[in-house]
Amino acid sequence: MNSLQVRVLGCSGAIARGARTTSFLIDDDLLVDAGTGVGDLSLEEMAQIDDVVLTHSHLDHIAALPLMVDAVASLRRRPLRVHGLRATLQVLRAHVFNNLVWPDFTALPSSDAPLVHFVEFDVGQSLMLGRRAPKVVEVLPAVHTVPACGFAVRRADGHSHWVYSGDTERNKPFWRRINQMDVGALVIETAFSTRERQLAERSLHLSPPTLVEELAQMSPMARYPVYVTHTKPAAATEIMAEVNALVGQLRLWDRIELRWLEAGQTIEVHGAGHPRG
């Protein structure tokens, strides 16, 4: 079986009751971003995670990482591998695992046997991750206020990708690349409503008008669901209504299947088919 199981732990742009920030658990052993949604996992589930891939260094995407490392320290026999862009890992070293905000678990309990091992990657690189269910993770470009990326993930024995934009503004190279892929599902951010479009542009996020501009770049042959993520809890309903209205005005419904991502969902991406969830 070569289907990819993507469990949505958190997909909100901020916290509130029932709202968790970004984190996805894939096949039980790969964590994509480490927002507050990680806190809903059991200790046993956290201990099964061998690799964490980070899109960027902003707090809503890394908040649970230091706490998770500490929580499972006695349950693991090998370091947790944390993969990121050089700039992201530099932030973690300087401002999180610095013995001031949190212990430096890259050197504890010893430098020879640390709890955390940082692994640098570059945009365009493909990683082979997952001991129990090998996966190929391609690092995609993103446009944000700090160095950032997205990911395309597939089973090593499969063809269809789960694609995640990360935090981004308009991004033609992203679309050029994924239009060459077999995409089973796309998760793309829309952090702000239309009335906050200027704030979205200053902070390099998408709003409904710019999201629809981005979706218009999908290959005409593409037929996969698009999950909207990273909405602020106070504006989530407003954002989805605006996105639906714009897609309707532009008559994109025959091409684009829009869904609202929610914590607790599981997206199953089959080897060469369409996802469930």
Image (cartoon, helix red, strand yellow):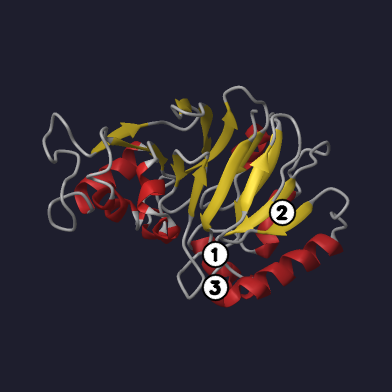
Residue occupied by mark 2: 213
The span from disc 2 to disc 1 (Cα, nearest Å) is 14 Å
Distance between the alpha carbons at the discs numbered 3 and 1? 15 Å
Question: Disc 3 on helix, strand or loop?
Answer: helix
Horizontally, residue 98 falls left or right of residue 172, namely left
Q: Nearer the viewer, residue 133 or 159?
A: 133
- Left or right placement of residue 261 versus residue 254 in this view: left
Q: Amino acid at mark 3?
A: Pro
Mark 1 residue type? Ala
Of mark 3 and mark 1, the one earlier in the sequence is 1
Mark 3 vs mark 2: give the one in front. 3
Dot 3 crowding, Cα within 10 Å, few <14, some 14–19, many 20+: some
Q: Give the residue drawn at x 16%, y 46%.
A: 104
Amino acid type at image mark 2: Glu
For label 1, the residue is 200
Q: The residue tagged with tag 2: helix, strand or loop?
A: helix
Given residues 179 and 96, the one toward you in this image is: 96
Closer to the camera, 53 or 37?
37
Please tell me in which quadrant of the rendered image residue 230 appears: bottom right
Q: Nearer the viewer, residue 177 or 198?
A: 177
Q: Earlier in the sequence, mark 2 or mark 1?
A: 1
In the rendered structure, are the residues bearing label 3 and label 2 in contact, judged by CB atoms less than 8 Å apart? no
Residue 233 tag number: 3
The spot of residue 277 in percent (x, y) is: 69, 51
Residue 46 in picture, x, y percent from top left: 38, 47
Q: Residue 174: percent from the left, percent from the top?
A: 60, 39
To which quarter of the image does residue 233 belong?
bottom right
